[in-house]
Image (cartoon, grey):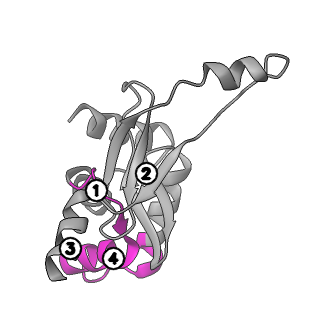
């Protein structure tokens, strides 16, 4: 719940109004924080509750929230997906991302001491590690059909 409060504070600090629509969007993605949700699914969910909300408004909010660090987007084979990502207090980690259902599992970062040593005369500002594949849940569904 702390991450949700942080997200709302970030919106306010960046001069965004805290509307019912923004609160619902954040709350929904927070509840689904282990998954990358398709924009189409998010759009459908939002327009179910707020029928007058346009596609453009939803996509613009996602883009703006991504720019200030509340949401993360990834391109999947079937289009762009979005995930709540506003937890700055966690230990550094990476993700295993299921290409079928969008589940994101936290995994520890590998030891980069050898990489850092080989780049000792360089300044490393950022690095990013992701592992993509099929989660155990989707794998079970696939193998049980065979």
Numbered disc 3: secondary structure:
helix
Residue 115: % across, % down: 68, 26
Q: Are marks 2 and 1 in contact (CB under 8 Å)?
A: yes
**Which of the two labelled residues, at mark 1 and mark 4, occupies the earlier sequence position?**
1
Numbered disc 1: secondary structure:
helix
Q: Which residue is mark 3?
A: 143
Query: What residue do we see at 39% from left, 73% from top?
Result: 39
**Which of the two labelled residues, at mark 3 and mark 1, occupies the earlier sequence position?**
1
Foreground residue among 50 and 131: 131
Q: Which residue is mark 2?
A: 71
Residue 52: % across, % down: 30, 82
Query: What residue do we see at 27% from left, 80% from top?
Result: 44
Residue sticking out furthest to the left: 144
**Which of the two labelled residues, at mark 4 and mark 3, occupies the earlier sequence position?**
4
**Which of the two labelled residues, at mark 2 and mark 4, occupies the earlier sequence position?**
4
As measured in the structure, the alpha-carbon distance from the residue carrying label 2 to the one carrying label 1 is 9 Å
**Which of the two labelled residues, at mark 2 and mark 1, occupies the earlier sequence position?**
1
Q: Are marks 4 and 3 in contact (CB under 8 Å)?
A: no
Which is in the foreground here, disc 2 or disc 3?
A: 3
How many other residues sit within 10 Å of disc 4, few (<14), some (14-19) or many (≥20)?
A: some
Which mark is on residue 29? 1
Please state the extent of the stretch shown in magenta in the rendering.
32-58
How many other residues sit within 10 Å of disc 3, few (<14), some (14-19) or many (≥20)?
A: few
Is residue 115 left or right of 56 when viewed as pictured?
A: right
As measured in the structure, the alpha-carbon distance from the residue carrying label 4 to the one carrying label 3 is 32 Å
Which is in the foreground here, disc 4 or disc 3?
A: 3
Foreground residue among 98 and 45: 98
In the rendered image, which quarter contains the N terminus?
top left
Q: Tell me, yes or no, whether the highlighted magenta stretch contains residue 126.
A: no
């Amino acid at each position: 719940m702390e991450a949700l409060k942080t997200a709302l504070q970030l919106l306010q600090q960046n001069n965004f109004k805290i509307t019912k629509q923004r609160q619902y969007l954040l709350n929904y993605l927070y509840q689904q924080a282990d998954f990358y949700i398709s924009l189409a699914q998010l759009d459908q969910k939002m327009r179910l509750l707020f029928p007058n909300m346009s596609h453009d408004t939803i996509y613009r909010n996602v883009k703006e929230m991504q720019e200030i660090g509340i949401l993360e987007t990834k391109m999947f084979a079937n289009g762009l997906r979005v995930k709540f990502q506003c937890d700055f207090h966690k230990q550094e980690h990476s993700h295993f991302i299921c290409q079928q259902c969008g589940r994101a599992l936290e995994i520890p970062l590998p030891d980069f001491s050898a990489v850092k040593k080989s780049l000792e005369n360089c300044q490393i500002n950022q690095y990013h590690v992701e592992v993509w594949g099929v989660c155990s849940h989707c794998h079970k569904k696939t193998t049980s059909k065979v």
